[in-house]
Amino acid sequence: MGNSSNQPISKERSLQLSTVWSCVKVISETIASLPISLYEKDADNKRYILSDNPLHSLVGEQPSTLYNSFSFFERALVDLCLDGNFFAYIERNNGGLPTQIIPIQCDDVSVYVSPDGREVYYEIEQNETIPYPFTGKATQENMIHIKGLSCDGIMGKSPIQSAAESLGISLSIEQFAGSFFKNGASVGGILKHPGTLKPETAKRLRASWNQTYSGSINAGKTAILEEGMEFISRQIPNNQAQFLESRQYQISDICRVFRVPNHLVNDLSNATYSNIEAQQIDFVVHTITPWIKRIEMALNQKLIPFNKKGSQYFKFNLTALLRGDSKSRADYYRTLVNIGVISPDEVRAFEDMNSMGGPSENVYMQSNMMPLDSLGEGTTRKDIE
């Protein structure tokens, strides 16, 4: 991918930037850590987890022989963050029920649209390193295709390619930093000789100077100049070129691409206790939620049997990410228990504690509350006095 900085941009090169690595890591590991369950709604719109359903364990525990649930969703988000697409082939038994969900490398899949624009099919090429159980043409019913931001609705846009200019600048800054410290954290310059040197003499002098004074291992050595030579610096010092400020800005610029708060990549330059909690909620609402919504819809579309669509569905549990600190959780639970929304046992379940049973299963409400239009009923003038 070309850019003004002339830095070649690829997935592998981008991951050499610590900020890109951290952004991809925090998004993929956060979503992979969330529990996902298969739910069913009854006629009263109450939902239950179908823990005995094979699809529940397939998605929530072991999608394939090579991938458990964590590694599967981690791989999915890595592909989405770097390629903008995630592909997985659905292996089915003779009855048409899914038995495995096998991730496919994005580079090994070609997407085609039928001439009438109503069907999408996929061409899977064999990978020499990773043996796929299926190659060739696959219909859309047997492929899970999760897309990131898309301009045509068919293929997602790669964040790496879309942000090639920003990443190219970051790679150039990192390359300059490496070269700067490799050369002993000193600027380059010109050796000025009062006389005229022969080409071979100048070449030998340059090689001798570089061998003696270049490199971090030679930093701090004292140069000895003879025959009236002098050293003239010819580069702008890093403090004048705002080198550190540029590196700091690129951290925020890359975080902006992935929509990750700076504190999650360990940049605490503008962080406070109060705004970190707000940023954490913002990360869940505006970064994590759109990704898991895409995943849930793709799983529901391709894995739920036709006669169960609408009543059965997959859903991630985001409760753990939104719990806040201990005091905030305690106040939140107390309020819900006092107004009769949840029972004490449900609070214990949210906190991964065993049920107490008995009265703890009941829902309670304070008795000193009454409807507004009932105020004053049963009260006489004498009672008031």
Image: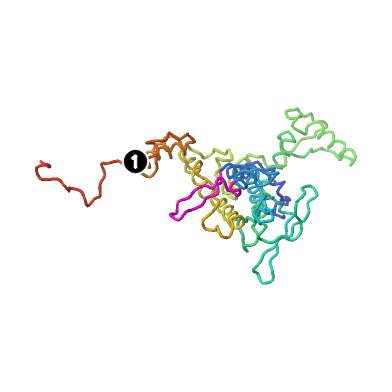
Secondary element at image label 1? loop
Q: Is residue 116 magenta?
A: no
- Crowding at label 1, few (<14), some or many (≥20) Cα neighbours within 10 Å? some
Q: Nearer the viewer, residue 217 or 303?
A: 303
How is the model colour-coded?
Answer: rainbow
Task: Read off the residue under disc 1.
Answer: 364
In this image, 262 relative to 194: left or right?
left
Q: Based on the displayed image, in which of its 4 quarters is residue 332 positioned?
A: top left
- Quadrant position of the C terminus in the picture: top left
For badge 1, the amino acid type reads Tyr
Q: Is residue 52 magenta?
A: yes
- Quadrant position of the N terminus in the picture: bottom right
In this image, 348 relative to 373: left or right?
right
Q: Based on the displayed image, in which of its 4 quarters is residue 108 positioned?
A: bottom right
- Note whether residue 212 is visible: yes
Q: Number of marks in the image?
A: 1
- Note whether residue 247 is visible: no
- Per the rendered image, the range of residues in magenta is 35-56
